[in-house]
Amino acid sequence: MAEKIKWFFETTKNTFSGANDPIHETFRANPYYSLVRESIQNSLDVCLDHSKPVEVRFEIISINQAEHPELFSLREHIESCLEFHKDNKQARDLYTGMLKYLNENNSIKILKVGDYNTKGMHYDPYNYQCPFTSFMGEGISSKSSGSGGSFGFGKGAYYVPSELRTILVSTMIEGDQVFFQGRTRLASHKIGDEIKGKDGVFKIEESGPITDVNDIGVMFRRKERGTDVFILGMRNDPNSGREMVKSVLNNFWLAIHENRLDVVIKTDDVNVHFDETNLEEIMNEYFPEENEYGSISELDQWNPKAYYKAVKYAGLSDDFILFDKDELPVIGPVRFYVYRNEGLQNRTSYMRKPAMTVYKTTRNILSGYAAVFICDNEEGNEILRQMENAAHNEWKPENVRFVASEEMHKYKEAYNQINKYVTEKLKSISGVGNSSKMEVIGLADFLSIPEELLDEEEAVPGMAESTRDGISSENKSLEETALITSINTKIKVKAYSSTTSSVADSAEKGSGEEIVFVGGGESNEESNPNPQPSEKRGNQLENGAFSEIGKGKTPISVRFRPAATKDEKGIVHNLIIQADQAHSGVVLDLKSGSDNGDDLPLAIIEADQGKYYGSSISGLSLAKGKNIIKVRFDDGIKHTLKLSAYEAK
């Protein structure tokens, strides 16, 4: 590598940046999962020959510090950051850790992410949105119509696995033209008498990347078109390889299945080569079961196996259903696959042209299924791309930018049409609307709810007239309630006279009989007649956002009724809670009842009171009498809710 290459940091006067990097914070919870997701999406976007698969390789290599003094002169800037921010504990911990890593490792690990059968990243000094400048910059996207992303923040995922927050990029485009540059994300610091900015660039001149292959270190030179990203200072994580394998399977199984993608992962813990011929074998090794556990928002609990089977075995039996001739008015032709099997979590996975899993929803319209919705035509894909957020995990009209207000109706229609389409297809399989409803004897008494919960002057806006069975509409479906089925059978249900949801009461009145709660939760210690605060791991979060949950929970007695209403954003669930006395520090745990009797997890994305995480709301205060709390779930559908109420101590 040329001796004249060095680190450049811009001199600043009135702008200062600390150690906290918002892009780093975005991806640190799942660093390897996010890296795989972002990097493969970038590579698929620039496929060179569509008759062959893109190949992406993740492999560990190493570099000796003594052999590359110009690169590791970065140490001087890290030391300056430590001195400049010595009164900030977060900064001290960060930069002390970086220096310790450099001092303890003469040979530095690098995670090399390389792609093949790709175009490489073109550089144009007069266009800041050209691919190379866009990738090396911040908040700039060069993605064109049909590409995977449009915000330009995904590149931040490359920095998170680095102990030094540093990457090097080497690319080759047509005509064997090469570009090479490094970038680091530190903080403001002082070199001599000058204040330097947080971003450093590793190159020869103060503007532009290196373009002479002879100035590029041998280990960093490309030999064919495509791009290598070198993540400098790979963290010593013994599970990094397995996390990357699972991310490939969860996010890109369809691209591999369709022979659009091959992936190689060589780390300290795995050596795997994915392609269409061995995809199912690797899937079975890493995901021996089909079921998913946890909420939709828990990425580490995702399982791609059932969705993969839904597509691979479509139409081979009555359990594998395919709708492939449908067209939606706004986004055009779509495909919908459904695999039915007892125990599956009633979820739908959504994809567009990049063949990457964007998000999942739960619809309890029928029991035991995994579904896949795909829109990969050019026009529909572009509409959905604009509706996708920066994290690439949702399609919503409010994510659309730089569009005239009069055009927004197109995106709202697309959103509504997708939800309606998926719901109608699932209903067509379940037979809802074609079969007789089940009559449940004694249902009215069983679901008796005090009328004071819905005093006329405090009625929830938009809610239908209250009924004694707690359902706010005469047009009931399996989407709205688990108490209706398509089987024409009469069943007797033993009525329970109490209208109170109290764990303590249930223990006293149990006497070995089956007890059913009205809107109430289950005991946190099922066999204990005098429940004490729970120390269950599932009720705690390490980062402090919900630390009060982890301090122990004492069940409290409330009466509860949910009422689903609709506003401009979609479905809102109103939690109507009647308390006999005031409570503070209240925690509510919510679950959705299903038609097979299982409780399904929910993911709250909005609540008008308290703090929410997963399916829980904490930090609430309940007044004596009626309380109404509005919540919105990520799947956007109506649920039959079960509620457990606790007071955090």
Image (tube, rainbow, N blue to C red):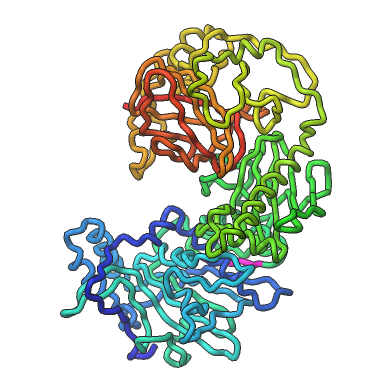
Q: Is residue 484 left or right of residue 212?
A: right
- Quarter of the image where one finds residue 495: top right
Query: Would you place residue 647 above or below residue 336 in this image?
Result: above
Please say whether residue 277 is visible from this viewpoint. no
Q: Is residue 421 left or right of residue 548?
A: right
Q: Position of residue 277 (x, y in %)?
A: 72, 62
Specify the principal SS of the magenta part. Answer: strand
In which quadrant will I find the C terminus? top left
Please say whether residue 570 is visible from this viewpoint. yes
Q: Is residue 526 magenta?
A: no
- Quarter of the image where one finds residue 225: bottom right
Q: Nearer the viewer, residue 295 or 113?
A: 295
Query: Would you place residue 638 above or below residue 29 in this image?
Result: above
Query: Would you place residue 502 above or below residue 417 in this image?
Result: above
Q: Residue visible at 49% across and 25% down?
A: 576
Q: Residue visible at 52% across and 25% down?
A: 459
In which quadrant will I find the N terminus? bottom left
Q: Nearer the viewer, residue 367 or 441?
A: 441
**Numbered-mark total:** 0
Q: Residue visible at 29% across and 70% down?
A: 102
Query: Would you place residue 500 above or below residue 638 in this image?
Result: above
- Quarter of the image where one finds residue 383: bottom right
Q: Nearer the viewer, residue 566 or 577?
A: 566
Q: Position of residue 376 (x, y in %)?
A: 70, 61
Q: Which residues, given as a range, are shown in magenta?
A: 261-266
Q: Position of residue 349 (x, y in %)?
A: 64, 49
